[in-house]
Amino acid sequence: MQGDDAELTAAVRAAQGGDETAFRTVYRSVQPRLLGYVRTLVGDGDAEDVASEAWLQIARDLGRFSGDADRFRGWAARIARNRALDHIRMRGRRPAVGGDDSELAARAGDADTAGEALEALGTGRALALIARLPQDQAEAVVLRVVVGLDAPTAAEVLGKRPGAVRTAAHRGLRRLAELMSPTAELTGGPGADPRRSPDGARPSRGVTRLRARTQKDM
């Protein structure tokens, strides 16, 4: 178990025993990526409220949780997804894909062809391109790359088989690679840079980069 995961596992167990400081540690560790995932479902405007509802349930049900850091992230993501889908049903809206740069900070990992394409994107552009993916691919990419879940845990969140999640994530990353290809941009097709101005100029990008897991790990 990596150092960060060991720390989160210990914090979760302490929080289950009523340690408020440990619970704050859990929240600070998980909230940024969890909020990023909620934004893929409900958009920016409602994400904070939905995430808050999710944390209320997490705090209430924490005593019944059992597992390590990876299991906790999956458990929290499943609660957040359920709260988001309830919100969507109540509002009568379709899921949205969106977010801001803070949830897509650099992720460690090797890169394959699709991963290199994703890593080469500025975060804002990555989010714009993820918004073009089918919903199943967008969720799979965000859960695997941003939240950091393995395929079996992401599958539990989505109610799918691990193989289906791996396939969706792989297809999503491959599609992102296609969308950012030079040929697509030059022709102004589906992969054209959505931030490029009419005169062809592209605004400067931040230095934040998103790294993807290797294709074999997806």
Image (spheres, helix red, strand yellow):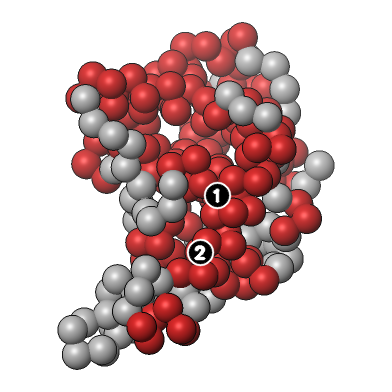
Which residue is label 1 attached to? 141
Q: Is residue 167 above or below residue 77?
A: below
> Which label number is shown at residue 176?
2
172 lies left or right of 200: right
- Looking at the image, how many numbered discs can be counted on the residues? 2
Label 1 SS: helix
| Image x and y of residue 93, in percent | 23, 31
Residue 215 versus residue 143: which sits nearer the camera? 215
Going by the image, does 79 lie left or right of 114? left
Between 144 and 23, the one nearer to me in the picture: 144
Q: What crowding class fits label 1: few (fewer than 14 Cα within 10 Å), some (14-19), or many (20 or more)?
A: many
Is 185 displayed left or right of 142 in the figure? left
Kindly identify the amino acid type of the residue bearing the numbered disc 1. Val
Badge 2 vs badge 1, beta-carbon distance below 8 Å:
yes
Residue at 62% in and 67% down: 114
Q: Residue at x 35, y 61 (%)?
A: 128
Name which of mark 2 and mark 1 comes first in the sequence: 1
Residue toward you, 94 or 217: 94
